[in-house]
Image (tube, rainbow, N blue to C red):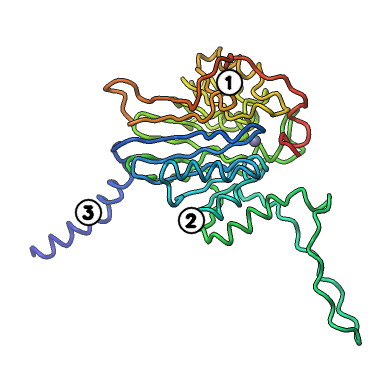
């Protein structure tokens, strides 16, 4: 009888108790760090998250040639292995250096939005003619204008294969437990993906289908917008049950005028906005209008083009003082509320240096 009772109790705990325990967010246990890296001066995004349990996430890797900056940062923060590399969307200023990072450090999991820009494999050439001597090996493929555009993507995919990381397509609603109480949730892109013909002025479908993430740690929360603009924000706003209110936001598309809409800010109510941008960008990032909207929403701003790397640290509790702290690599005398002049509209082509 006792054996039966114990057995039933054990089964009940396993069946109902354990899932309940697991579904509760773990309590904060230490310090969470978010480093918005300085991958300027042209433009790009790369953000390193280190959870209180030491798990690491890299969101984007900056443009081609920026791999060293990113790898140096990983070394500086003693990250020997990345638990996750997340490519928000396939544009060179976000994954241009992904191949450099993937070949420089072991990565356990790679997540992207599933958009495949691979260059199609060349059609097999005609059969060798009879009687001819063994043909010399074909010359290495030249970077022609028609082929070269998506080379960065081929390099990313090749490096992903070489690295041996597990690949996963981002699924909205999916949560990643980073340990110590930190949870990363995928908010976008949701199906059906935005298509080119749905884009309004300023819109670019690849940007619009960016992965958007929310990070929670105790009482602290932060949004990572990738290069998502107003249309993606509207789609998120349409989900009335989605919790978008966060302390900090890495605003969309480097401060583009087409992102960070008034309505979106009303729902997010950020206290702090981080702008990852480059001093040499030609698109007028950050736009004065986006900065004005942030000011009107009572958010403070930090900019990588003026202040270098921006670091946010939090213990997940605000009871004994500040909930989080923001530090920058350098001081600036410039006005962080002054936008940049555009030399090129960021709706042209795809919003990146082609
Ligand atoms: Zn970008």
Determine which residue is flagged by label 3: 13
Label 3 CB, ligand 1: below 8 Å? no
The mark found on residue 123 in the picture is none
**In the image, which is nearer the foreground, mark 3 or mark 2?**
2
Residue 77 found in image quarter = top left
Q: CA distance from mark 1 to mark 3?
A: 45 Å
Residue displayed at 63% across by 19% down: 290
User: For the N terminus, which image quadrant?
Assistant: bottom left
Label 1 CB, ligand 1: below 8 Å? no
Residue displayed at 34% across by 32% down: 218
302 relative to 228 in the view: left or right: left
Residue displayed at 22% across by 53% down: 13
C-beta proximity under 8 Å, tags 3 and 2? no
User: For the C terminus, which image quadrant?
Assistant: top right
Residue 192 found in image quarter = top right
Residue displayed at 84% across by 71% down: 125
For marks 1 and 3, the one nearer the N-term is 3
Q: CA distance from mark 2 to mark 1?
A: 40 Å
For marks 3 and 2, the one nearer the N-term is 3
For marks 2 and 1, the one nearer the N-term is 2
The mark found on residue 106 in the picture is 2
Q: Residues within 10 Å of mark 3 (few under 14, many from 20)?
A: some
Residue most extreme to the top: 296
Residue 2 found in image quarter = bottom left
């Amino acid at each position: 009888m006792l054996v039966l009772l114990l057995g039933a109790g054990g089964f009940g705990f396993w069946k109902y108790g354990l899932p309940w325990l697991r579904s509760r967010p773990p309590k904060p246990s230490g310090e969470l760090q978010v480093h918005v890296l300085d991958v300027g001066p042209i433009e790009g995004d790369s953000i390193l998250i280190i959870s209180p349990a030491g798990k690491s996430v890299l969101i984007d890797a900056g443009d081609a040639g920026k791999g060293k900056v990113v790898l140096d940062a990983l070394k500086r923060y003693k990250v020997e292995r990345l638990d996750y590399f997340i490519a928000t969307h396939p544009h060179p200023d976000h994954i241009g250096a992904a191949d450099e990072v993937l070949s420089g450090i072991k990565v356990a999991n790679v997540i992207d939005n599933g958009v495949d820009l691979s260059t199609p494999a060349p059609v097999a050439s005609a059969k060798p003619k009879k009687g001819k001597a063994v043909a010399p090996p074909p010359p290495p493929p030249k970077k022609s204008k028609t082929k070269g555009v998506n080379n960065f993507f081929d390099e990313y995919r090749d490096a992903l294969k070489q690295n041996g990381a597990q690949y996963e397509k981002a699924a909205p609603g999916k949560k990643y437990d980073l340990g110590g109480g930190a949870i990363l949730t995928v908010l976008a892109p949701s199906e059906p993906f935005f298509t080119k013909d749905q884009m309004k002025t300023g819109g670019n479908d690849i940007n619009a289908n960016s992965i958007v993430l929310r990070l929670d740690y105790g009482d602290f929360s932060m949004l990572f917008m990738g290069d998502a603009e107003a249309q993606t924000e509207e789609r998120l706003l349409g989900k009335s049950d989605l919790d978008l209110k966060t302390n900090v936001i890495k605003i969309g598309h480097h401060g583009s005028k087409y992102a960070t809409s008034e309505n979106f800010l009303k729902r997010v109510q950020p206290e702090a906005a981080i702008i990852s941008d480059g001093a040499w960008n030609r698109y007028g990032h950050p736009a004065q209008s986006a900065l004005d909207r942030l000011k009107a929403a009572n958010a403070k701003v930090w900019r990588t083009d003026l202040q270098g790397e921006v670091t946010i640290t939090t213990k997940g509790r605000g009871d004994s003082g500040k909930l989080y702290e923001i530090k920058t690599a350098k001081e600036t005398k410039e006005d962080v509320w002054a936008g940049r002049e555009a030399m090129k509209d960021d709706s042209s082509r795809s919003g990146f240096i082609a």
